Image (cartoon, rainbow, N blue to C red):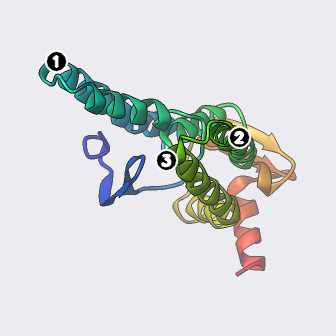
Amino acid sequence: MGYLLGWKIINITFYPYGGKTLFKTYENSSINKEILILLAGPFAQIITYLILNYFFKYQYIKNYHLTILIFNLLPILTLDGGRLLNLILNKFLSYLKSFYITAIISIITTISLIIFCILNYHNLNLFLMSIFLMFKIIKNIKDIKYYYDKFLIERYLYNFKFNKRRVVNSIYNLYKESNHYIEFSDEDTYLNKYFENNH
């Protein structure tokens, strides 16, 4: 799907809970395109499950695949479910607010999984996966400044022209797919001053 929409694939990494495709793209990419690309993964998993269900009699393999599909749709950062939640929030909230709400939901969900595993101690795989995801969430939270700087630099360099206009009181309240007026300045003027003072 990413290829069809013109995104360049950099690499594909496999994790215990599935794979992750890294694209050469922008933080300011179209939200709808990102959602389409994101949903293509679970859709492919559903098709694979239906094929397995039809051709293979081994219930263990089918159940394992279905478990990965459901797990991947949990609202946890780095999983498809968490990324989908973040993109939906981006339609209504600022970039940073969307991220932090997603991060809080991710932490609550992951802690719930860890507590579940402790109470059901036979589920060691899920426990280890939950711990791994918690470290990934913490890393994403630490890296948010880098991603937001990238978000701002792209807008500074490429001068995106979006249809929506918003008035915000801070450079830290910018939305995806919107141009802004910040402290009585248009976004381009404000970003020029911002980067001239912070280079």
Percent coordinates x, y for residue 84 in the rendering: 54, 35
Residue 46, quarter of picture: top left
Amino acid under label 2?
Answer: Ile
Q: Which disc, if any, is residue 115? A: 2
- Is residue 53 positioned above or below 13 on the image? above
- Check disc 3 and give the amino acid type: Asn
Q: Which of marks 2 and 3 is nearer the N terminus?
A: 2
Q: Write the residue at 33% across / 33% down.
A: 65
Q: Neighbour class for label 3 at 10 Å: few (<14), some, many (≥20)?
A: few
Q: Residue 61 vs residue 20: left or right? A: left
Q: What element carries label 2?
A: helix
Q: Distance between the residues labelled 1 and 2?
A: 36 Å
* Residue 195 appearing in the image: yes
Q: Is residue 39 visible?
A: no
Mark 3 → mark 1, Cα distance in angstroms? 27 Å
Which residue sits at x=56%, y=61%?
Answer: 154
Name the foreground residue: 32 vs 109: 109
Crowdedness near tag 2: few (<14), some (14–19) or many (≥20) residues, C-alpha within 10 Å: some
**Which one is nearer the viewer's eye here, 113 or 1?**
113
Q: In this view, does 180 lie to the left or right of 13?
A: right
Q: In which quarter of the image is the C terminus?
A: bottom right
Q: Point out residue 144 in the picture as x, y percentages from the top left corner.
A: 67, 60
- Give the SS element for disc 1: helix
Labels 3 & 1 near each other (Cβ < 8 A): no
List the single residue furthest toward the bottom: 199
Give the x, y percent position of residue 67.
Answer: 42, 31
Disc 1 residue type (three-letter): Tyr
Q: Earlier in the sequence, mark 3 or mark 1?
A: 1
For mark 1, what is the residue?
54
Disc 3: which residue: 125
Position of the N terminus, as image quadrant, is: top left
